[in-house]
Amino acid sequence: MQLSREELLKAYRDMVTIRRFEERVQEEFSKGSIPGFVHLYAGEEAAAVGVCSHLGPQDYIASTHRGHGHSIAKGCDPVVMMQELFAKKGGLCGGKGGSMHIADLDRGMLGANGIVGGGPPLVVGAALTAKTLGRGTVAVSFTGDGGSNQGTTFEAMNMAVVLKLPAVFVFENNQYGEGTGVGYAVGSHDIAGRAAGFGLPAAKVSGDDFFAVHEAAGEAVERARAGGGPSAIEVDTCRFYGHHSGDAQLYRGKDEVRRLRDERDCLKHFRRRVGEAALLERAELDAVDAEIAALIERAVETARTASPPAEADLLTDVYVSY
Amino acid sequence: MPQKSIRQALNEALAQEMRRDPTVVVIGEDVAGGAATEGQRDAYGGVLGVTKGLFAEFGEARVIDTPITESAIMGAAAGAAVTGLRPVAELMFSDFFGVCFDQIFNQAAKFRYMFGGKAKTPLVIRTMIGAGRSAAAQHSQSPYHIFTSVPGLKCVVPSNAYDAKGLLIQAIRDDDPVIFCEHKLMYDLRAEVPDEPYTIPFGEANIVRDGDEVTVIALSRMVHYANEAIDTLAKEGIECELIDPRTTSPLDEDTILESVERTGRLVVVDEATPRCSIATDIAALVADKAFAALKAPVRRVTAPHTPVPFAPSLEKLYIPSPERIAAAIREVHGYAG
């Protein structure tokens, strides 16, 4: 699948935005600027961007507790996102959702989700809406290797096959469900193979390689849009931080993260690939880096000085009317 | 006015709303039935026939048979509601909320609040409640108090065919998630029901009968048992006011409090178990806001704190009876006021 220069630059910009956003969130969380919990996506950028580059604002995604990357890839404004993480009224959810529930329905982002396996059934619903109303849109669920073991996920895949829905189930296998390895928790050691058992085409790709994810996702999204039903994609990826920010990561091997950053960094791979193929100039990529650094700085400054929700906001937004 | 059963009233409400609004869909197990069988399609129309005939009129795109997969049904309905449909999902027995509550309680109920007021989830979950058919512990419960306790959900518990139609149409047009509880022993209960569509607002109790001595509050099938008890007491010269809240969330507190202010005596009848229940909730409401008016202790007539038994003899003891209701009313009436 040939990408234009503009598409390549956008993919790079989105991946860099996620990386810098997450690095800064880690820093701000450590300083105490961000309440609650955050789960960082750094290292997995190629998955979110490789998939979402095939989606428009009318397509839906549902995410996980590790949802910042999916939000950015789906077009959410990092400045408004950062305010949400800082629990400010100007945030995407008015400061009432936070990192684990960040959502932007106007951009087809159905929410991060505090419940592992919470998203796939919702994606079945979004795909049902698309099919029933003939919208020609698709719905994509992002789930981790942990969520791949949940019954809700199995039910969702089966029902999507039964109802021939325009859905894509993306499994981001970052090798850990919290602090337990996939080799222990996924009985078959094969998430894609298990998905195939539900009767949907399932591919397995390396999350180190944006282009591999992009190609597999392109086929799955195209199949869904054309009425060919749901697909699954397992992305073999890695996370550079712990389960949550502040996780001591005692379950990881010595030097594991350093090795992953050296060998499996999807951003480095991307830069090398586009450089070798002379698709983008180094100066262009550096310019994007500088642009994003400024954007993230602005996001944090805006979030830092923004107002928290008002006391009256406690009681609003429970119902449309009551 | 034509007499219709609750089953017919619900069916009519669904058909009329589906004709009016193409985004209304019905989804659940065997809502039509007969898919991939040698027999007929629409073989069921819901296990108790509430959705019968909808498949023939609206087809498989809007009358959606699912596998037995409650999490996927509730999740699909929630996801569809937040993206543009108005699904009426069927949770065959309310007891089954145990396998799918996450999608109702953590997802659908909380979207609007979590997302800062930007989500709208016009979802109806129709579900069967009630003991009395020896269906035993996993098919007989009345867990509307659990749904009522969840901010973000509304809960409807109709007692007659007229209310059932108006409340279901209201539920479908409502922009929030609504749990609609149908008592499994009342589907054949008939009442006058207009042919044309109409709505009954949520949070407006029905004063079933007037009286000045004792306020009796009952829901669903218990409205009829309470009415029987009150008939008996009327012969003894005790005049009771019977209130059917119709919806437990929102709850019409004003009508309840106004009545208790007048009578000073309250009996609450509830087929559910007694702890953290609607009966307990209403007793607390009155203790909190109408304490000075009370002339007698509040009495709750409820199921015991047990699972629903199978044996008909035990189940009869489990369900509040007109006799137990009458005894409670006599007791509070007997207090010097």
Image (cartoon, coloured by chain):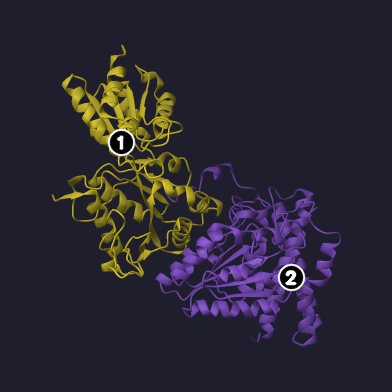
Chain colours: A purple, B yellow
* Numbered badge on residue B312: 1
How many numbered marks appear? Answer: 2
Q: Within the image, what quadrant is residue A207 found in?
A: bottom right
* Percent of width and height locating residue A244: 72, 54
Q: Who is closer to the viewer here, A289 or A141?
A: A141
Q: Residue furthest front?
A: B311
Query: Horizontal placement of B141 versus A112: left or right?
Result: left
- Cβ–Cβ below 8 Å for labels 1 and 2? no
Position of the N terminus of chain A, as image quadrant, is bottom right
Circle 1 chain: B
In the rendered image, the quadrant that contains the C terminus of chain A is top left
Residue B85 horizontal side relative to residue A18, left or right: left
Q: CA separation, marks 1 and 2? A: 68 Å
> Residue A16 shows which numbered tag?
2
Q: Residue furthest left?
A: B1
Residue in view at x 40 percent, y 30 percent: B304
Q: Position of residue A153 (x, y in %)?
A: 55, 61
Q: Amino acid at mark 1?
A: Pro
Q: Is residue B137 above or below residue A148?
A: above
Q: Nearer the viewer, residue A69 or B119?
A: A69
Name the amino acid, label 2. Val
- Determine if residue B206 is in view: yes
Q: Position of residue B6 (x, y in %)?
A: 24, 49
Determine crowd level at label 2: few under 14, some 14-19, many 20+ residues with C-alpha closer than 10 A: many
- Residue B311 is left or right of residue A264, and the answer is left
Q: Position of residue B263 (x, y in %)?
A: 29, 22
Q: Give the quarter of the image for residue A74.
A: bottom right
Q: Is residue A136 above or below residue A246?
A: below
